[in-house]
Image: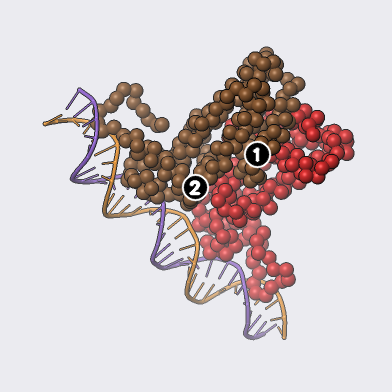
Chain colours: A red, B brown, C orange, D purple
DNA sequence: CCGTTACGCTACGACTCGTAGCGAAAGCGG
DNA sequence: CCGCTTTCGCTACGAGTCGTAGCGTAACGG
């Protein structure tokens, strides 16, 4: 997660169990208290470790919450559902299923907000969370091109811009629907969204 | 902004200048310190008022920041640019211009995060900020229907769902592009986004 | 001028922060 | 088996923030 030495070092190794306990305790505290009222002392107590142990591993609240939240994005996958529309709809529902978790709702937006004036934190979020999502967009686009649903990329730069656009549209819409509008991303909404997106991508470019 | 009595009450009235000074000081502190390090004591000092005055008007940091940020959304307008695409592109650029301000980036996401476990705060955000944005979507849709660019609404419920979908797509994409991807919403991106959206809306429904 | 409310100021206990210092525990290499 | 090294739990600490209470003063309205 953080500093790792390539070869095994001497001395007592860090407890891996403590890591998982701390991250689980962080998610639990996020649900109960929310971001602003979450304290590291409380997390340490919940995890059954000393507060100093926590500070030895994470610089502060921001970084800890990023790691605690990022772990939940591991389950994002995109099996081949046969068509671009089905792939998009599937990933939208899957992404939404993660976002409705209270620990995600409370934590993700908070660290994004903090990242606006902390470049290191922004990079940590990008590496831990955003790239993990964007990978799915690349997969889905490649499949759609093989099927002939999307035109093959001519200009690689143009292709990269399109991928970024799709990514922002999908992730942005789901996040906004879930957190700002506070409405559920049900199959009906996912279908309507997918219809607009696929239709819009069909002839563009 | 908060409790108002319909008729003039007796006693010394609250200083309107103090309100604007506090809100301005809050935005200033958001830029310099960000959300987590912003303290109400510091805001009071910057505004030249006593800390108690601040607590008499706002319950806490969350509500204060919502009001401080909401004021900047007043400038959102949507002049008739002649076509649905032009209208959307215009509002996207305008919305993005507000979002790039550091006080918005730091404040908006933070209060949204807090609102996930504070219903009163969510309602305050909805009334102060979200509805102000959604109004533009309604205007744009009505104009497009008059021009014949969009089919007239048959089912009012279906129409409401479509408006919500468009709103989440536009606001979500712009927010995500600006805050998460940390890339600029320039005319090129706005054009590409608008093309996809208008094309996608064209035949749907 | 008098009642009422807002204001600035000070002080306060409670809490959180992040760090330092200590002795004990847990691996690793010889 | 034994040192060496690093982590661990624990305690304590100064610094800073929180939100409130109490006070005397200032500003309006009738």
- Say which mark, if any, is on residue B31: 2
Q: Residue at x 52, y 38 (%)?
A: B115
Residue B94 seen anywhere in this rendered image of the structure = yes
The answer to whether B146 is drawn above or below residue B81 in the figure is above
Q: Name the residue under label 1.
A: B186
Q: Please state which of residues B44 and B32 is positioned toward the viewer in this rendering.
A: B32
> In terms of image quadrants, where is residue A175?
top right
Mark 2, chain letter? B
Horizontally, residue B74 falls left or right of residue B140, namely left
SS category of the residue bearing label 1: loop
SS category of the residue bearing label 2: helix
- Say which mark, if any, is on residue A5: none
- Answer with mark 1 or mark 2, whichever residue precedes in sequence: 2
How crowded pointer 2 is (Cα within 10 Å; few <14, some 14-19, many 20+) is rated as: many
Discs 1 and 2 share one subunit: yes
Q: Which residue is drawn at 58% across and 60% down?
A: A58
Horizontally, residue B122 falls left or right of residue A132, namely left
Residue A139 seen anywhere in this rendered image of the structure = no
The answer to whether B8 is drawn above or below residue A30 in the figure is above
Q: Position of residue B147 (x, y in %)?
A: 67, 16
Q: Where is residue B125 in the image (x, y as percent from the top left)?
A: 51, 34
Q: Where is residue B170 in the image (x, y as percent from the top left)?
A: 64, 32
Mark 1 and mark 2: span between their CA atoms?
Answer: 22 Å
Contact check, label 1 and label 2, Cβ < 8 Å: no
> In terms of image quadrants, where is residue A63?
bottom right
Horizontally, residue A133 falls left or right of residue C1, namely right
Mark 1, chain letter? B
Q: Which of marks 1 and 2 is in front?
A: 1
Q: In what quadrant of the picture does the C terminus of chain A appear?
A: top right
């Amino acid at each position: 997660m953080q500093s790792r030495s390539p070869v095994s070092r001497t001395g007592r190794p860090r407890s891996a169990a403590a890591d998982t306990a701390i991250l689980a305790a962080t998610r639990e505290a996020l649900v109960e208290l929310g971001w602003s009222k979450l304290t590291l002392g409380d997390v340490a107590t919940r995890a059954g470790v000393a507060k100093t142990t926590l500070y030895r591993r994470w610089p502060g609240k921001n970084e800890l919450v990023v790691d605690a939240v990022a772990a939940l994005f591991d389950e994002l996958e995109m099996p081949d559902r046969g068509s671009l529309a089905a792939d998009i709809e599937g990933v939208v529902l899957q992404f939404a299923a993660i976002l409705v978790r209270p620990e995600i709702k409370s934590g993700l937006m908070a660290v994004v907000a903090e990242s606006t004036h902390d470049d290191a934190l922004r990079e940590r979020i990008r590496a831990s969370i955003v790239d993990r999502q964007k990978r799915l967009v690349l997969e889905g686009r490649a499949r759609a091109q093989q099927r002939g649903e999307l035109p093959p990329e001519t200009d690689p730069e143009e292709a990269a811009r399109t991928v970024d656009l799709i990514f922002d549209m999908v992730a942005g819409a789901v996040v906004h629907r879930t957190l700002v509008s506070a409405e559920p991303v049900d199959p009906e909404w996912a279908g309507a969204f997918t219809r607009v997106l696929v239709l819009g991508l069909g002839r563009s470019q």
